[in-house]
Image (tube, rainbow, N blue to C red):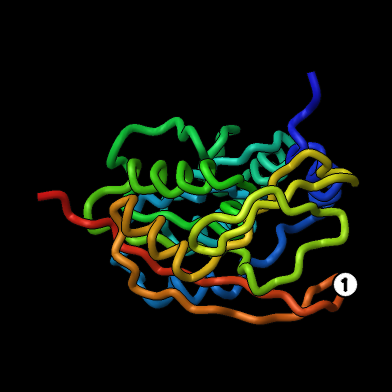
Amino acid sequence: MRENPIVSGYRNKYERTLSSESPDAPYPQVVEFVQKYGQQLGRRVADLGSGNGRNLIYLSQAGYEPIGVELTPQGAQATKKHLEKLGLKSEVVIGNINTLPFDNASFESAISRRVFDYSDDAEAREKFQEAARILKPNALMFLSVRSAEQAPKSNETLEFENQYGGKTFLVESGSEKGAKQHYFTEAELRYLAEDSGFEVLKLQPRAYRGKNDNENKFEFILELRKSVVA
């Protein structure tokens, strides 16, 4: 059975993190979100696709009780290593955010940075619905996703374009061969969020330069609130 292409694609990156003496810095956009909302985030925060733990560790140091969900064993192992070294008690579990291993309404807030990108059309909707399912009414969520304004990579082939202009590409070669990559539009994000029971508080495009390739990159930053069910 072929290994999940996302796991194989990130193995080397997270194995390098395992050998480092300190965790990577949290993403500035996550820090801004946490500082903006503070106590409104509650205590129990889900980090959906926690990677090597950079944001989860920041949340733990800031006094929250985050639980990370990470698909790759290497990412989870790197996170646990740094948590232990720093004397932090936060938890990370290996799992898929399309089928989260948590009860309904069990978190007061959530974050997810550039993980919803790894989806086809149906999987993107599943991720929104699962995030909404585990959040309590009025819970806040930070989300960042790739924008359809960004040019696809040379090894990606267009597989599907939906009615909102969102595009799913298939990775044809390289370490992530076989993975799906989704490029979102603003109209699509508003539909997915609202259809899943979220109020959109912020939906902002962001342009930046790639760290390794120095190319123009485009993403959306979202702040969402779980609607109160009457």
Counting labels gives 1
Q: Is residue 53 visible?
A: no
Residue sitting at the far front: 163
Read off the residue under disc 1. 213
Left or right side of 142 for 195:
left
Q: Position of residue 70 (x, y in %)?
A: 61, 41
Q: Position of residue 198 (x, y in %)?
A: 31, 58
| Quadrant housing residue 193 | bottom left
In the rendered image, the vertical position of residue 207 relative to residue 211, given as above or below: below
Left or right side of 230 for 103:
right
In the rendered image, the vertical position of residue 212 relative to residue 136, given as above or below: below
Q: Secondary structure at mark 1?
A: loop
Which residue does the image show at 41% across and 41% down from the upper left? 130
Q: Position of residue 176 (x, y in %)?
A: 81, 44
Which residue does the image show at 39% across and 75% down from the upper left? 202
> As shown in the figure, which amino acid type bears the numbered disc 1?
Asp
Disc 1 crowd, CA 10 A, few/some/many (<14, 14-19, 20+):
few
Left or right side of 44 for 164:
right
Is 104 or 166 nearer to us in this picture? Answer: 166
Which residue does the image show at 34% across and 68% down from the upper left? 200
Q: Is residue 133 visible?
A: yes
Q: Quadrant of the N terminus?
A: top right
